[in-house]
Image: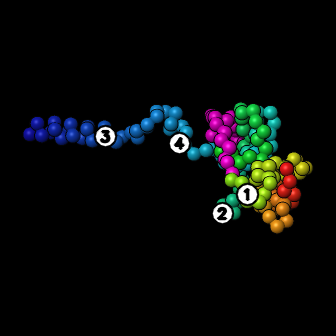
Amino acid sequence: MKTVGLMFISFLLLLSACGSAEPSLSGEADSETQRSPDITGYVMDQQDDQILVVTPKDPASSGTMRAVWVSDAADDLWIGKQVEVWLDGPVQESFPEQGKAEQVAVLEMSDVDGADLQVTEALSSVLSSVASEDILSVDLISFDPDADEWTVKLTELGTGSHLKEIIADKK
């Protein structure tokens, strides 16, 4: 009876040791890259090594958009690009939020058939021409091949005002 008890306890210990941890193929760094980004959105402003990432308006949600000033972004021209950002450490919960970049990845967008400009270039062009003191969020970016022009619709987060800009599709 004592032997059966010891075998039972040994069996339980063996079972508890199996499958308790998820294996990682490449160690700790791999698990970090597997986590979801903290924010995905468009870069709407840039100041030195800081970029303002704003989520686009999501009609399926309550319409709440998120804006984060991300510091320690690599030296690049960011305005108009769609990015995923992984933040390093705590986020200051001001408006806009503030955090330090662990990683920023540009989401590559496919070229639009018949368009000379890329989506990023169209948005960047509009952002450079719009005079707004408010934080802007993207509602829509579309290309009309018949008119050979881009339509960019933005929302001012503070006032809720909508802006519509139409630009020619010329580089």
Percent position of residue 77, x then y: 78, 39
Can residue 159 be seen here? no
Q: Which amino acid does label 1 sit on?
A: Val
Q: In this view, does 24 lie to the left or right of 97?
A: left
Label pair 4/3, CB-CB below 8 angstroms: no
Query: Residue 54 in magenta?
Result: no
Residue assigned mark 2: 60
Q: Comparing marks 4 and 3, which lies closer to the viewer?
A: 4
- Callout 1 secondary element: loop
- Label 3 vs 1, first from the N-terminus: 3
Q: Which amino acid does label 3 sit on?
A: Cys
* Marks 2 and 4, how far apart at CA: 26 Å
Seen at 84% across and 56% down, the residue is 169
- Label 4 vs 3, first from the N-terminus: 3
Seen at 66% across and 47% down, the residue is 107
**Which numbered disc covers residue 6?**
none
- Callout 4 secondary element: helix
Q: What's drawn in magenta, residue-wise?
A: 86-109
Label pair 2/3, CB-CB below 8 angstroms: no
